[in-house]
Image (cartoon, coloured by chain):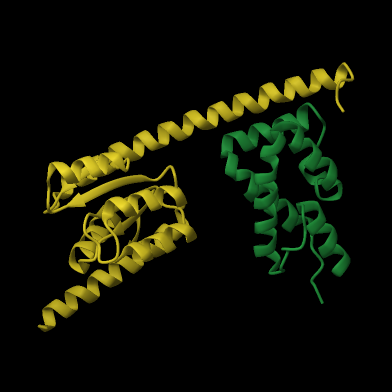
Chain colours: A green, B yellow
């Protein structure tokens, strides 16, 4: 039985993945998302698709790199094999279903 | 081996363990990979660098260095010219694939024009001679790490500018209904 995935793990994984763009850039990204688009960090786990779309808006194809990082860190955090999933939100949906 | 040597070796290992455990918690310290097949040079360099406050890892050959660079991030690599399984210059080329921004310093006991040209062609950041002068090597490391940090800050500030500009553009597009 897979352990239910909690919001804290999802946020941690996203934060770790976004660190790839640098601490200041990550902070700037969260500021823009919150200030300009009213997209708050604590709302991310329940709106993963919207979050994914927002990041695609910022980074275009570059988002694929971040998505791969999110998936890798999620796999490490949960110990699950996530090879079969195409996107980070698919992974989270799959893990939620399994639990 | 005399007892005093053994005690000294144990003391060095003990000190390195203490420094390593401290490094684990101080992640902002620069991480250095020392690659040399001569264990005495490798361990002495590692010890000296750890005492200067760097987090140091060691590899005795090219294969070990490549494996370590895949598993961990290093700011800088000190590469011996002659390694048992690969030439130092070739290893620099391989390390560039795993960590492009890593600073690479070549160490050689056989200085020649050919060696220097090969190091420059493989984009080594510095070329230093053995026997190692610790003061020179540590000054060089600090200088190169400072340049690396400045380049990183510049890249990050470009990224911040990009994000802020992109956010404004997306907002404008949202207001004018141009978003897909």
- Residue B29 vs residue B128, the one in the foreground: B128
Which quadrant holds the C terminus of chain B? top right
| Quarter location, residue B135 | top left
Query: Along the horizontal axis of the image, is B101 left or right of A98?
Result: left
- The image quarter containing residue A81 is bottom right
The picture places residue B38, in percent across and down from the top left corner, at: 20, 66
Q: Nearer the viewer, residue B96 or B132?
A: B96
Q: Nearer the viewer, residue A27 or A19?
A: A19
Q: Residue A3, position in %: x, y? A: 79, 71
Q: Nearer the viewer, residue B14 or B114?
A: B114
How many numbered marks does the figure carry?
Answer: 0
Q: How far across and down, in percent of the image, does residue B141 sit? A: 28, 43
Identify which residue is drawn at 22% across, 68% down.
B39
Quarter holding the N terminus of chain B is bottom left
Q: Is B175 situated above or below B110? A: above
Which residue is drawn at the image coordinates 24% and 40% (left, top)? Answer: B140
Q: Residue at x 43, y 63 (%)?
A: B67
Is residue B57 shown to the viewer in this render? yes
Vertical position of residue B178 compared to residue B66: above or below: above
Q: Is residue A79 left or right of residue B97?
A: right
Q: Is residue B53 visible?
A: no
Q: x, y (%) of residue B108?
A: 17, 52
In this rendering, the answer to whether A59 lies above or below B85 is: above
């Amino acid at each position: 039985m897979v352990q239910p995935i909690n919001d804290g793990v999802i946020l941690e994984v996203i934060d770790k993945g976004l660190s790839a763009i640098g601490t200041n850039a990550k902070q700037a990204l969260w500021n823009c998302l919150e200030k300009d688009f009213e997209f708050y960090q604590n709302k991310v786990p329940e709106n993963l698709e919207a979050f994914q779309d927002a990041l695609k808006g910022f980074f275009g194809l570059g988002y694929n790199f971040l998505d791969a990082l999110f998936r890798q860190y999620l796999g490490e955090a949960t110990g699950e094999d996530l090879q079969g999933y195409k996107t980070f939100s698919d992974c989270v949906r799959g893990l939620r279903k399994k639990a | 081996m005399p007892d005093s040597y053994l005690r000294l070796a144990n003391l060095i290992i003990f000190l390195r363990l203490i420094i390593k455990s401290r490094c684990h918690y101080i992640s902002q310290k620069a991480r250095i990979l020392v690659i040399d097949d001569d264990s005495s040079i490798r361990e002495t360099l590692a010890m000296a660098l750890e005492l200067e406050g760097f987090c140091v890892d060691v590899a005795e050959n090219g294969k070990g260095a490549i494996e370590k660079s895949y598993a961990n991030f290093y700011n800088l690599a000190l590469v011996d010219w002659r390694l048992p399984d690969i030439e130092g210059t070739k290893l620099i080329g391989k390390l560039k694939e795993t960590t492009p921004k890593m600073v690479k310093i070549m160490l050689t006991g056989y200085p020649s024009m050919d060696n220097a040209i090969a190091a420059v062609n493989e984009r080594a950041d510095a070329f230093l001679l053995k026997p190692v002068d610790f003061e020179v090597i540590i000054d060089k490391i600090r200088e190169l790490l400072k340049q690396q940090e400045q380049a990183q800050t510049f890249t990050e500030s470009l990224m911040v500018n990009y994000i802020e500009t992109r956010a404004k553009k997306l907002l404008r597009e949202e207001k004018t209904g141009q978003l897909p």
